[in-house]
Amino acid sequence: MKLDIGCGAHKLPDSYGIDRLALPGVNLVSDLNGGIPFPDHSVDFIALSRMLPYVHDLTFVLSELYRVSTHKAVFCLLCPYAHNFRYSSNPYLKHKFDEHTPRYLTSQFLQPEGSPVCPPISPYHHFPQPPYDFRLLRMELFYEAPYRSDFYEPDELEMLKELQANVVAEILYYFVVVKGPLTEQEWASMCNQVHPEPHTVKLLRSIAP
């Protein structure tokens, strides 16, 4: 089963749509804060767009996403980027996401030598081990309009986002849910696979240069 959480009126084909509003195509009107009403190990793909930063208890919701997922399920997550004044001043936004967030969602280290597509993930031993294991497959940044131009080289954009705010608008992650053995080769192969994208991501791509 595939879940599209926060699907709005444009859920992914062949997926089960969950939203807080009763919009066309939504199969279940539900709030993530109350949990996910699905059995354990029943979902092999989850798309979650722009909702996770607003939940009350992030650990609880991530644990629910982990619970309903099968081993090696793919979790696609789109979030507002933390270092953007438009989001940092939002009083309803409770959790921040950037390129360092994946370090806190797993206690494992997996990084094929020389891999250009998977940013490194390293354990933070002074934090409690999380009750879930989401390992990053890839992530992608969507830039604000002034930076969506061929004028900037990728290394220039990388430097700009480290030096100033309001360069990046949103961040997209793909994770694999790990509940059993996962070899480095399996993980590296999944990093390079093409996975479904929610409608919101397709809209973001449509405005890219």
Image (cartoon, grey):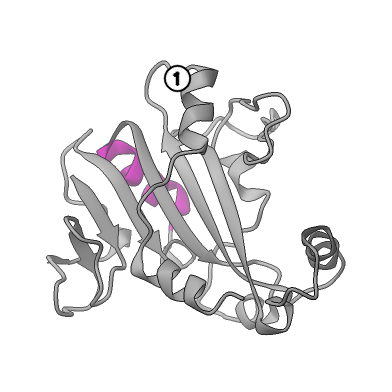
Residue 79 vs residue 54, the one in the foreground? 79
Residue 78, percent from left and from top: 47, 62
Number of dots carrying numbers: 1
Image quadrant in which you'd find residue 151: bottom right
Which residue is at a point 41% across and 66% down the rendered structure image?
A: 51
- Answer left or right for 206 relative to 149: left
Q: Which residue is mark 1?
A: 182
Q: In the displayed structure, would residue 63 be above or below residue 115?
A: below
In this rendering, would 45 be left or right of 110? left
For disc 1, the neighbor class at 10 Å (few under 14, some 14 to 19, many from 20) is few
Magenta-highlighted residues: 57-69
Q: Residue at x 51, y 64 (%)?
A: 79
Q: Amino acid at mark 1?
A: Leu
Q: Residue 122: where, in percent of width, then height? A: 69, 32
Residue 87 at x, y = what percent?
A: 61, 77
Judged from the image, the secondary structure of the residue bearing numbered disc 1 is loop
Tell whether position 60 is magenta. yes
Residue 207: give x, y in percent of width and height.
53, 79
Residue in the image at 61% along x and 25% along y? 110
Residue in view at x 32 percent, y 60 percent: 33
Question: Is residue 152 shown in magenta?
Answer: no
Q: Quadrant of the C terminus?
A: bottom right
Q: Is residue 134 visible?
A: no
Q: Is 132 or 167 nearer to us in this picture?
A: 167
**SS assignment for the magenta stretch, majority:** helix
Q: Quadrant of the N terminus?
A: top left
Front residue of 133/127: it is: 133
In the picture shown, does residue 118 fall above or below 9? above
Q: Is residue 20 above or below residue 122?
A: below
Left or right, residue 199 beside residue 50: left
Q: Is residue 190 visible to the viewer in this orientation of the structure? A: yes
